[in-house]
Amino acid sequence: MENEDDDPIIQELDVYLAKSLAEKLYLFQYPIRPSMMNYDGVPHLSARIKPKQQKVELDMAVNTMSPNYCRSKGEQIALNVDGTCNDETSTYSSKLMDKQTFSSIQAASNTSRYAVAFYRKGEIHVTPLHGILQMRPSFTYLDKADTKYREREAANDAGDSSQDEGEDDVKQVTVRFSRPESEQAKQRRAQSYEFLQKKQAEESWVHLHYCGIKDSRSEHERQYLLCQNQTMTENQELMKSPSEYLQMLMPVNVEEECEKPLAPSNVLSMAQLRTLPLADQIKILMKNVKVIPFANLMGLMAAGTESIAVLRCIQQVAMLVQGNWVVKSDVMYPKESSSPHSGVSAEVLCRGRDFVMWKFTQGRWVVRKEVATVTKLCQEDVKEFLDQIAIPRINKGWEFMLPFDEDFIKKHPDVVQRQSMLWKGIQSKLEKVFNLSKEDLMSKKTDTTSAASSTVIPGDQTLNRARAKAKENQARLEKDLQKKKEQAKLSSSVTVVADVHIKEEPMSDDESMDTSTYESFNNGMVNGVHVDENSKESLNGDKDPVARELMEFVQSTFRRQYVLTMSELKRLFNLHLASLPPGHTLFSGISDKMLQETVLNSGCKQIMVPFPPQSTATPEEQKVFALWTCGDTHDKERQALLELFSKGHRLRRNMIQTGMSQEFGESLSKQQLDKVLKDCCVCYGGMWYLKGTVQS
């Protein structure tokens, strides 16, 4: 009872189950770097989907004005991808990498346990999720750049060969007939990765229209997150007894049936890993990490694992290099495997990798050309060896990945001696296989060991140096802090005087808000024509409360949207009516003519968009109204943009850029153009339309 008194129930909320979007609601998870995001916070340029695969791709804008953006790199990438031509197939129409593509994958196979909750007026409306998609960066533009490069090389080779050849020689052609494919071969081919990729690529993309969070269409769709019918008959699924409700929350069998791998490969699950024997745990870890200090390896083991047992197991699958453990070559390349680059056998790969590991026992640095010359392996195989255990340094070579571990050498001299004997045996084998000179090896070893020993600084000396440096800076920091405190006291005294002065002038309760920002909507102008005082008073609706309420709705709507069609405005007005209490003045009846006159009288203009003859837009959708004067610094740019759309119902960005440049010259920045485009237009399929005029 005491616990219940300390934690009382403050409020009880009704929970409703909304099903309008139960089969359509998806959750997108995608990363956005704030420093590279578009300045207006709206990252999407376009979206497309493959319905059968439930795969989505999003093009997100990159803030090219950010100080973290390298403009020369962006221009170079755009040139490599699109070349010098600029047509409809161009990935970057602005000749600058100004967008990044994100592709989706299924984040969860079973989404039945996930839902979205919408809280409104003391009610919680829950909608089940149909899927969760995780967006990841896509780099298909690099493939396009490689394709362009190969096409140019092929064209150059064809041009050279055509100049050398005088006549076409008659060549013998061999014709072969393939055997009929068996059913098993067909099944194997249908399950192959190449066949599945080809089948997925055949499905065409369907372009989508992205609506921002403040878009009217988004506001309309969000209404479906609310339960449409809140009667008891529609919510029987939530009308359960306490015992039934508890069973729904905690069912008896909640384990999902899924195929668990015997051993993790790329992504390790520590819970599954620790169920395996200790030797298998260490082997799997070493195959994944390749190189690890002994202290870090002990940190990955379960609590209570003895270091002696770990040392016994690690020596079976790894070798000691500079105090760190490196996985053995025969563990990385089993007997039946071969190189994916050159196709050589695992035995040859093991010899080459052992040579690289042995070189790092002699010093910190290895040169790739020297390794390739000795082992006679291709550059790709040698690079794969080095990537596993080393880091490339410019103009120096490859440096061992981890620093020299002196602690392990001091604590375990017996293990170090045993590993040294193993390395001597490996060295003798490598000398026979690669015909190495012992004198050269000994001289190199002494040089590298002396160089390494000269650069090693003990940890105690580093710590003492840091402490001495901190003591030297302490006095200077205290003086700076004292000066800042004195300055803060002076500024605080000035602030107190200013505060007292402000309090001597109290604000009147009847004082009205400053509306100078929005006076330009009704400053004696109606579509650019002056009106007299009587007509102005009637337009403001001072005598008619219905007209006044309607004018307030129209002005507030166009301040948010800037451009609206008559059809979209009527839809928003109906939503506004639905949110009003019963008996409101606007329920007296508003005709289409009255609504249109109110729009024209509120400072808006009708944009005569030339729709094509084959357009499917209704007459109300072809009536486009725009807020002509907003009162901010972008009025002239918006007006010039709206004038451009009186010449064509859709425009390319380069055409808009050209028209705006002729009007404003070089004073118009990319940021200003993006701002007015976002206010008035939408991009669909690479073309820009006024809001509400896109015809799918």
Image: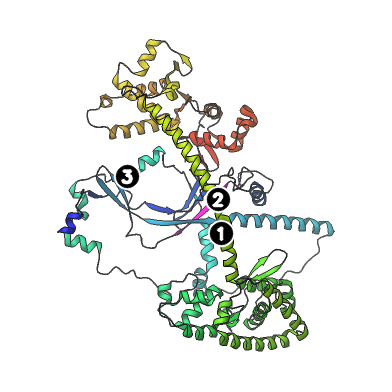
Of 597 and 433, nearer the camera is 433
Q: Which element is circle 2 on?
A: strand
Q: Which percent across, then down, holds residue 233?
A: 18, 49
Q: Which residue is mark 3?
A: 224
Span shown in magenta: 96-113
Examine the image and state in which quarter residue 429 appears: bottom right
Q: Which residue is mark 1?
A: 471
Label located before the other in sequence (3 or 1): 3
Q: Which residue is mark 2?
A: 100
Residue 390 visible to the viewer? yes
Label located before the other in sequence (2 or 3): 2
Label located before the other in sequence (1 or 2): 2
Relative height, residue 93 to residue 255 (above, below): above
Relative height, residue 90 to residue 424 (above, below): above
What amino acid is at disc 3? Tyr
Name which residue lies at 58% across and 57% down: 472
Name which residue lies at 21% across and 51% down: 235
Of 401 and 560, nearer the camera is 401
Distance from the alpha carbon under mark 1 to that under mark 2: 49 Å
Dot 1, crowdedness within 10 Å: few (<14), some or many (≥20)?
few
